[in-house]
Image (cartoon, rainbow, N blue to C red):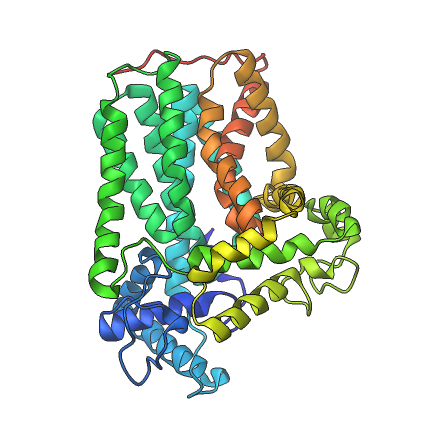
Amino acid sequence: MAAMIVSKPTRNLQDFDQPFYVTLGYDLDHYGIFSNGPFSSVDDTLQAPPPGMFFGPVYPFLVAVVMKIDPRFAAAVDCSVAANRGHRDIASCDPYDLPMRLFNAILLAIATVAIACTGELIFRRRAIFWVTGAGTLIALVCESSAFSYIMTESTIFALYSLLMLVMVLAWRTGRTRDFVFAGLLLGVLSLTKPSYLVLFPVLAVVSLFYRRWGHGRRRGGRPIVAFSLAFLAVIGAWVGRNALSVGKFGFTEEYGAAVLIERFAYNDMTAREFFQAFPYCTPGFGDAVFDIIYGTDSMHRFTYHTAGSFFHVGRDRRDALVAQYGRLDPLISGIIRDEMRGGWWRHLLVSVPLAWCGLWAGWLASLVLVPLFALACWRSVRARRPLLILYAVPAVAMLGLDALIGNHYTRYNLILIGPYAVGAAAIIASWLAGRHWRWRFPAPSS
């Protein structure tokens, strides 16, 4: 995994979304302030920026830690931020990001083992561990370019994989301490990307369902209350920081509004683009039929860097509103009302191809993993053993959320790789054993 990530070309630290996290790490390293990064109102190479709350603090903190450890990386970040503020030519900066790439590889290794352990925990067969780990690794290698940037994908993938391992353990055992640990992990995950806040009610409901139908050890509602309190303790600490440092009582600002405004641009999708999105986003087939790299054909609006793309139309509208009004949060309710009035059905309809595009996490590997995962879910339903399906529910919920308020890029849905790999491993292990898999589920342990 490390070899695949390190082998990817390095252009500079301003490529893609890297300036966000590089600037946030810079401000933490130089001033000890968690700011809004490039969205700050001041030039942070000349003076300390004001505190901010647009981004989650976890990944910028990790960038700042690596800056303390590796002076060469710190110098590369300093140069990149200066270039982003117009004080340097980015071509003169050292495009050095090796420590972050290696750190991403370590996180992915942890995630792979966590997913493999989850597979073994669900099906109680040692072969599942190895097949799940192999499937996960193959899918991650296919997506390795996404992990070669200084961005949150590897951190999110690792935290989510650990969260669901602990969550499955909590469902099986019913132990309060497992639910507490899961609540803490969910809080940290939400501090990495705010949209994961939606998993709190999802996991609470799934836990209630699992216990209601007698699959988990019954101990009243105490474990779920403990899960909720642990999650709220982490979230509450960040909200308290925002109230004291920023002067605003809330988890984030502008984040949801900015994402939604960019998403509304996709509602302009034509009927041709709607139907072509399905073959376009199918791994392998789309690459052969469409110009996915340069966007020179009828699907050019799906390629983020082309002129007039959905991404750029949404981003330009967001920037224009910020330039005119300063803030988005006071405007977003009116924008949503205008977009949904008479057009709610179109928004939902457009979300269908966006969800189709997002579900192929793992690129070519997903062509094998997705059908096997679907077969595994069908067998679980027939056997009345819902644990695999419940394990997949949070990732599928995030897929739907990203289709409704985000975009079609698979890098936002990489957490689907875990359920895909576990389900596929169960089917493959049954085939390797030369017999029909009996979907056993052991009695809950104390």
Q: Is residue 214 visible?
A: yes
Residue closer to the observer: 352 or 436: 352
Residue at point 33%, 51% (across, down): 191
Residue 9 appears left or right of 120 = right
Residue 163 falls in which quadrant of the image? top left
Residue 271 appears left or right of 106 = right
Residue closer to the observer: 413 or 270: 270
Residue 240 falls in which quadrant of the image? bottom left
Q: How many labels does the image show?
A: 0
Residue 152, relative to residue 26: is it above or below? above
Residue at point 35%, 72% (across, down): 73
x then y, percent, for residue 376: 56, 22
Q: Can residue 13 be seen in this view?
A: no
Residue 389, relative to residue 85: is it above or below? above
Residue 358, relative to residue 178: is it above or below? below
Residue 393, relative to residue 20: is it above or below? above
Residue at point 42%, 56% (across, down): 152
x then y, percent, for residue 63: 33, 64
Residue 226 falls in which quadrant of the image? top left
